[in-house]
Image (cartoon, helix red, strand yellow):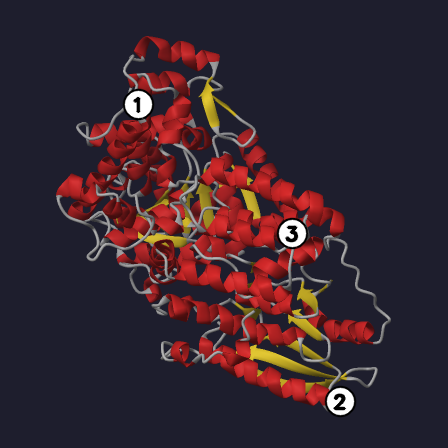
Amino acid sequence: MTNYDDIDFSPILAVTEGEVITHSRVRDIRLRSGKVLALVTLDNGRDHTRPNTLGPATMFQLGETLDALKARAAAGEIQAVGITGKQYILAAGADLSDISKVGSKDNARMVAQLGHKVFGQLSELGVPTFAFVNGLALGGGLEIALNSTYRTVDASAAAIALPEVFLGIIPGWGGAYLLPNLIGIENALEVVISNPLKQNRMLKPQQAFDYGIVDAIFPAANYLEDSLAWADGVLGGKIKVDRKNEPGKIERLTKWPIAVKVARGMLESKIGTVPKSPYVALDLLDKARNGSKAEGFAREDEALAELVTGDQFAASMYAFDLVQKRAKRPVGAPDKELAKKVTKVGIIGAGLMASQFALLFVRKLQVPVLITDLDQARVDKGVAYIHDEIGKLEAKGRLDGDSANKLRALVTGTTDKSLYADCDFVIEAVFEEVGVKQQVFGEIEQIIAEDAILATNTSSLSVEEIGANLAHPERLVGFHFFNPVAVMPLIEIVKTPQTSDAALSTAFVVAKNLGKNAVLTADAPGFVVNRLLAKVMGEAARAVYEGTPVADVEKAFAPLGLPMGPFQLIDLVGWKVAAHVQDTMVHAFPDRFYANENFHALAELPEVVEKDKGGRVTGWTKAAEKTLKPAVGSSPASADVILRRVQDGLAQEIKLMLDEGVVPEVEDIDLCLILGAGWPFIDGGASPYLDREGASQRAFGDTFHHPVIKGIAG
């Protein structure tokens, strides 16, 4: 086994120039029993918008701090060690910008070994260690806690997760060995593999407690005091820690291998076998049932060294940078000082989409929200839905009673449009037809203040045309949400030639306050995401009408790595919406987009496709078969032909969008597809994938990136 004390770690210190060091500050706390707990607080000296991160210099300092505490414990000066973070944050894991600079496999291995050396000390200080998870704990932040003897969590902590698989690597500082041995294999599979692959889902503190990741949960108001009192009780033997999910011998022998086998089958059917990190993580979790901790840590060292220097991590880092940096500073957004202060929001419509908007606006902006519709019955139904959703949040403990009542009181529904008079921001969620949208905006413009902003949620219509009859078209902006509204992080903000900087600035500020990432796009058909998804859906439809079975078409699209196949996606967004978007694109670019009039016939059916338990499309319903039969040919396309068509079509369309100035740079298209369509991180987004597959060369004789960004090879 590796002796971490014998390793010279200086090569990785050399690549960390400019690291923001998270310091380990120590103070002694005398507990009520008289025992002394040395409390280490991790703090990078920045405000809570810059989380603590764990670069090599940070780790060295923490290692020295723990060495000193070990000596004090041996001298009898302290009876316990606690570790916590600055306000709201324990740590957000390794500094990934540093890790991506390590270069060689030896250096990458050293990053893993340094984490194991330092965090491993938490279980070797000679006294019990307590991790007080007072806020965000991701990756290495959570692994600090896992290496400690006991753990508590603040009930208001933002998120707890091991997101490494999402980024093309694995939990490499103890997580892959310690977690399954703490909470059992099934729970560990959920945290380490399933959640990262579900668009990087995180755990709430209560879930972390229910899984057994932490031993106690306390409210924010007295979190540290309660945790210290609890630690005192544990030290004195008054509190017994019961770990009900810790695996026993029987589970290791029988349940463990079966769970791993089932997980492998699920992975193969859902994501194929190209992504490496989920399978490497699966092997590590499987092997964690046998052998020593030292052997487990050594396996993590090798796995991390392999993945960090691989192509999939390089592509992930490109995608990660887009989401972490570019998304936070949207290109083309005017000065936020120009934004109009939004003190009341109006929503035209009271259907499901409008009601989802209202819920999001009232929760995030905490201002009065008005919804209207043609008749009171529709309005009442919309308000009832919003109240019901607020009730569900209250029942789950995500809102207290007072907050829930306050939110309900802020939502008003009426048929009286005169109440829009004092709204600063009015968004429509009405039928997707230019004439209808023009009509409702025409009415509302007579009522609202001259500087109030109008927003349209159109998914593909011309924003300029929608505003053609307005007295002040400069106040209109496109504000395109994605479904489901509460979950999808992207808003496409659409600028017409008339849109004022004040309207645009207001839209960006509102999007940010809603917790969304906004990307600026020109007023072009389908904007970014729907234009490219229409390309994908059109190629799927073309293959079906040639005579390819629907299940074969879905499989042909699998190498794209999207969260779902084209027909599963159409089924989610709705066949009518998909048919409408397809029509818009065919009307705009008849030579490049495929549509078939049968799409509209299918859209009228209550059920179009059959699906299995996992939600994957397996075939058509009988009614759909009947509708399609006269139009379907008898020359099915092979999977390779279908995939190449969609790759080349996407490459051509992205190049044209850049030439037309739909967005400033190709990075914005990749960002939109990652946030709005779930394009996988390990591909690095669409353009690097198309470069690597040769589609860019085939479509326009060049590549989007010079040099080509590494990632999954063909």
Foreground disc of the pair 1, 2: 2
For the view shown, which residue lies furthest in the front direction? 1
Asked which secondary structure carries label 1, the reply is helix
- Mark 1–mark 2 Cα distance, whole angstroms, equals 75 Å
Q: How many numbered marks have been drawn onto this rendered protein structure?
A: 3
* Residue 482, image x, y percentages: 42, 42
The amino acid beneath tag 2 is Gly
Q: Which mark is residue 631?
A: none
Image marks 1 and 2: residues in contact by CB distance under 8 Å: no
The amino acid beneath tag 3 is Ala
Residue 632 vs 105, above or below: the answer is above
Q: Which mark is residue 404?
A: 3
Q: Which mark is residue 543?
A: 1
The amino acid beneath tag 1 is Ala
39 relative to 378 in the view: left or right:
right
Q: Quadrant of the N terminus?
A: bottom right
